[in-house]
Image (cartoon, helix red, strand yellow):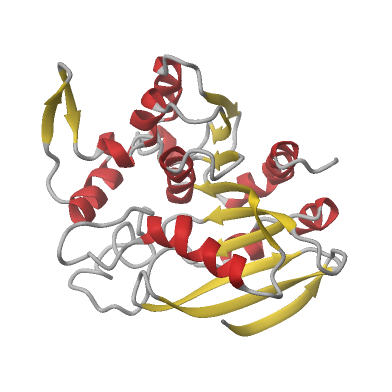
Amino acid sequence: MECLQCVKHHGGHVLKLRHTSQVLGCAMQFTLFLPPQPPAISVPTLIWLSGLTCTEDNFAQKAGAFRTAARLGLMVVCPDTSPRGLQLPGETDSWSFGEGASFYVDATTPTYARYQMASYVARELPALLAAHPQIPYDAARVSISGHSMGGHGALVLSLRHPGQFQSVSAFAPIANPMQCAWGRTAFEGYLGTEKMTSRDGRTQSSWAVWDASELAAVYSGPPLAVLVDQGTADNFYADGQLRPQALKDGAARNPEGRFNLQLRMQEGYDHSYYFVSTFIEEHLLFHAKHLGIAV
């Protein structure tokens, strides 16, 4: 890894790091907050996934999270939102698809086959952190969170990788992408045309394995603690892009109650980082509880 920047912050350090991703086939950057900690002591980690049009910088610069993370001794890792510079057809035509808009899936269409962001976030990036001698990463104490498209990514990755994340939270996630315009456009571009199959007497969509509301209903891994905040004044909530009720319904359909969702509707809040920064401390404390951090 190459360190592009290192800035002291709340007694710890904010680093911007770059490496060559074998999974994505390009250079990738991520921001890492390293809290103050004794030498040779590994620390718990929160992976943060940002939303449409964002980079590895948005959360670090706007959320105001690192004061609390420093107090908790929590490392925060913020990857970029997609591969960069691949120059694929249509990659930069829309702000809601392509570069900066990966939806954190492993694409299967020939054009976007290099968009393997699920594998990057869940496998390659953690392995990179664990292998670096100067990064005190503890693979047994990791949680995940995100905003909007990143909230979708956090929910889906925690559901697809049972036991890897101790807890998951999201701000205004795209909770049911199969049933919203953003999600259907992205899924068709990355996953191909939706296919319906019949299994055990039920009709199932080929896209369902990337939809948190569908996955929540059938999740059978270790009990998963889930916190979701949704602002009532969010224009994307109003126009049906986010669909938090579908996630709540999916959790209610889970026969074993293993997707333990706490959905909070926050009166008057919008989709911006004003919303995220208002409640980020509560989310960090939620994760601290499940990561074994004394508060």
Q: Quadrant of the C terminus?
A: top right
* Left-right relation of 166 to 210: right
For residue 246, say whether it is visible: no
Q: Quadrant of the N terminus?
A: bottom right
**Identity of the residue drawn at 38% across and 60% down:** 117
Q: How many marks?
A: 0
The quadrant in which residue 63 appears is: bottom right
- Could you say which is closer to the camera, residue 226 or residue 236? 226
Above or below, 22 against 224 in this view is below
For residue 58, say whether it is visible: yes
* Left-right relation of 134 to 89: right
* Left-right relation of 162 to 9: left
Above or below, 229 against 108 in this view is above
**Identity of the residue drawn at 43% across and 26% down:** 220
- Could you say which is closer to the camera, residue 223 or residue 287? 223
* Left-right relation of 188 to 127: left
Task: Give how far across and how far down residue 221 sits, in percent.
Answer: 47, 30
Task: Give how far across and how far down residue 3 sits, in percent.
Answer: 63, 83
Task: Give how far across and how far down residue 164 sits, in percent.
Answer: 54, 45
Task: Give how far across and how far down residue 41 sits, in percent.
Answer: 81, 62
Above or below, 64 against 284 in this view is below
The quadrant in which residue 90 appears is: bottom left
